[in-house]
Amino acid sequence: MSTSEIPEEIPDQPASQEVEASEPASPDATPNRMTWMEDTLEWGVRAQPGKHGLTMRDINTGIYGDVPDESQDMSRRPRGAFPIPGVPRTDLYTLNHKVELWADNAVDLYEEAIQRRWMAHIDIPWESMDPHSEEVELATRQLCTELAQQASIETDVIGQWLHHMNYAYHEVKTFLASELFDSGRHYAAFRQRALANGGGLGLESPGHMNRRLLECRAGWTETALYLYILRGTLTLLLYRYGESYAQDRAEKLLFRMCMQDKSRHMAYGM
């Protein structure tokens, strides 16, 4: 065969599948990886602020304000958030029934707590204190030591129960968190008073009620009975006497502010 008779080579043609693969995909065919943004149990909510601003009660609207009588949700998602599969289950919650911990006023007590917060190192006029007689200072330091210990125990008791409360009842959890903060402030404030006027800390409490509070395992209802009905009423009475017999402006304001906080705690417990 002569050279002129050799057929011209035809380049290989890609298979139809290869042609389709090499072409850019249509924008309409691109998978939407942001569909999760459309997952919501209720959309279009517009909570309206009240005279105290946008409070927790104001945002309890629609499904976000529905408080279940019982919750079997063992996740940590905020109430009303869209659940997703595969989230590890937590078995920490033992308080899953509304009747075990609920108080209708908890949401308002939380707002009061954050609006009336105070700081002992600034708001108490420590410079106004005058020297007291040794007898008065000894009595005052013992009272402050006892009240500081009571506040410390209250912090521990509430702290060991908070993580057992289901997130469906976040109004109670947030209020108790504010109470825990109040108790920490009371502990520091009474130590400050005991050490601010030439005295010192007194004797430790025998701790019979403290032990009952810390070791109560019957339930939150039983613990609250000890914390508010038995211990809380005594603490509030001591605050009242402390204000009545205060020797100066600093002591009077200290007991008055602590009494304000404790009255709020009792409003939940009662």
Image: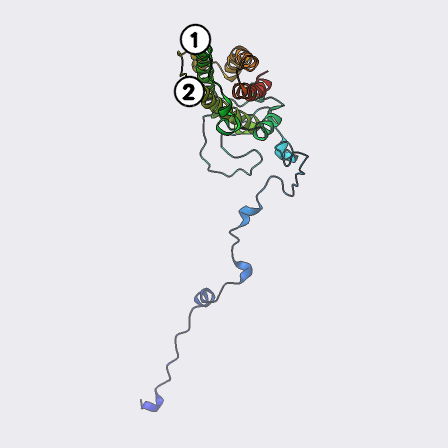
- Residue at (32%, 90%) from the top-left corner? 3
Question: Which residue is disc 2 drawn over?
Answer: 195
Q: Which mark is residue 208?
A: 1
Q: Is any part of residue 99 visible from this angle?
A: no
- Horizontal side of 264 relative to 199 (left or right) equals right
Per the image, label 2 sits on a secondary structure element best described as loop
When the figure is inspected, residue 16 is found, relative to residue 173, above or below; the finding is below
Question: Where residue 87 appears, x then y in whole percent?
Answer: 46, 36
Between residues 12 and 246, which one lies in front from this camera angle?
246
- Quadrant of the image occupied by residue 52: top right
Given residues 170 and 19, the one toward you in this image is 170
**Identity of the residue drawn at 43% across and 14% down:** 215
Is there any visible trace of residue 19 in the rendered image? yes
> What x and y, as percent, mark residue 232?
53, 14
The amino acid beneath tag 2 is Leu
Numbered badge on residue 19: none
